[in-house]
Amino acid sequence: MSFEILAQDGPARLGRLSTPHGVVDTPVFMPVATQASVKAISQEDLESLGARAILANSYHLYLRPGTEVVKAAGGLHKFMTYEGMILTDSGGFQVMSLADLRKLDDDGVVFKSHIDGSSHRLTPEKVIDIQADLGSDCWTTLDECPPYPATEQQARTALERTMRWTDRSLDALKRRRDQGARSLFFPILQGGFYPELRRRAAEHMSGLPCDGVSMGGFSVGEPKELTWETVALTTQALPREKPRYLMGVGTPEELWEAVANGVDMLDCVFPTRVARNGQLMTKRGKFNITQSACRADQSPIDPDCSCFVCRRYSRSYLAHLYRAKELIIYRLLSYHNLHCMAEVASDIRRSIAEGRFAQARREFLAGRNSQFAHKIG
C-alpha cells in the first residue's frame, strides 16, 4: 500500500491511494454497496461512472448471505464481479442504531439479527476475521459510536472502549496478514464532539500500524457547524502521510467542506437514498421530480450534465415514470445522482491540482440555489 500526496492547497490534498485492487485518486466519494450492491445500480453502471472505490458492510454481509458464501465464491470482488477497491465498514454504526436489539460489554457486542431475530456476538477479533473472509481491500474496526447528544463521560467511555477494541484487533490483523492477506487497515476513530477526546483518539491512532484512519461518529444528528469544527481539529491532529476517511458524509456541499478540512475519502448512502424518493442532485442545487412543474417540462434534469439520463430523458418523462412507480426510475435517478457526486469529486481534484481550491469552493457554494429547477426548462 502507498498513499502519495501529489498536491496540496491549504488543507485540501490531492492524493493517490494504491490498493490490492488498483489505484484510487483522492479526494474520492465512494458509493455505498451495503449488501454487495449499490441500490438500483449495476456493476456495469459503476464501471461507466468510473467508480474505482465502493463501501460494503460486513455486518449486513455476515448476516446475509453469510461470510461462508462470499468466501466460497472467491471473496467479495468475485462474488459481485467488481474489480475496484472495496472498503468494509465494521458495523458499529448499525449496531448503535439497533440499540433495542443489542447489549454492549467490554468484550464486544451481542445483538439480535434484524432479519430473523437470531442472536450473534461480535468481538474485535471476529470483525477482522469476517472482513478477511469477505476479502475486502480496506478493513475497519469494531467501534462504539456514541449518539448525539452525548455527555462528555458517555463519549469518553465509548472512546476508551473503542481504543481497547482497536488494540485487540491487532493480533487478528497480524494473524491474517501472516496468512497472506494484503488488505489495508483503517481503524475507526471516535471521541464525540469533544476536542480533548478527539485529540486523544488521534494520538492513540498515531501509534498504531494503520494504513489510514476512519473518522467515525459524524452525521449522527449534530449541527453542521459542529461537524466541520470537529473534523478540522481531528485532521490537524492526524499524521499527514495517512489518508483520512470521513464516514457517512456525502452531499455535494459536504464534499467541498470535508476536503477543505483535510479529508481524502468519503462515503454516504444519501445520493441513492434520496433518488428513490425522487430528489435529484445537481451542482447548482436540488429539486424533486414530483414537483408539478416537472410534469410538462421537456428539459433534462440538468442541461449541463453529461450523464446518459440527462442526455436522453426529459423531466416530464422521468416524472411520469416516478408517478407510475415504474421500477426503472430508481436506476435512472440513482445513476444521475452518483454521476453528479463523481463530477463534483473530479472538480475538486482538478481545483487542487491547479492551486485554486479555495476560489473554486467559493464559486461552487455561491452558485447553489435549491430553487434553480423552477428557472430553467
Image (cartoon, rainbow, N blue to C red):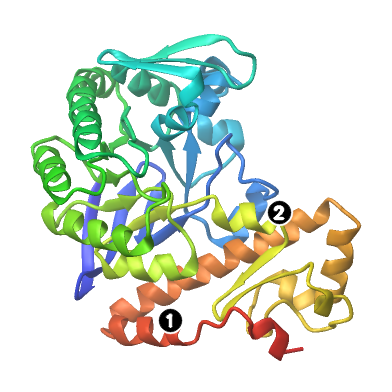
Query: Image quadrant of residue 350?
Result: bottom left
Q: Residue at x 91, y 57 (%)?
A: 324
* Category of crowding for the residue at label 2, using alpha-carbon neighbours closer than 10 angstroms: few (below 14), some (14–19), many (at least 20): some
Please tell me whether residue 104 is drawn above or below residue 284 in the rendered image: above
Left or right: 326 with respect to 238?
Answer: right
Of callouts 2 and 1, the N-terminal one: 2
Residue beneath label 1, please? 365
Q: Residue at x 57, y 9 (%)?
A: 118
Give the residue type that dot 1 points to: Leu
Q: Position of residue 353 (x, y in %)?
A: 29, 78
Residue beneath label 2, please? 276
Q: Position of residue 375 (x, y in %)?
A: 70, 90
Q: Position of residue 43 (x, y in %)?
A: 63, 48
Residue 96 vs residue 237, the one in the foreground: 96
Q: Residue at x 15, y 41 (%)?
A: 201
Which quadrant of the rendered structure holds the C terminus? bottom right
Please tell me whether residue 331 is drawn above or below residue 197 in the rendered image: below
* Category of crowding for the residue at label 1, using alpha-carbon neighbours closer than 10 angstroms: few (below 14), some (14–19), many (at least 20): some
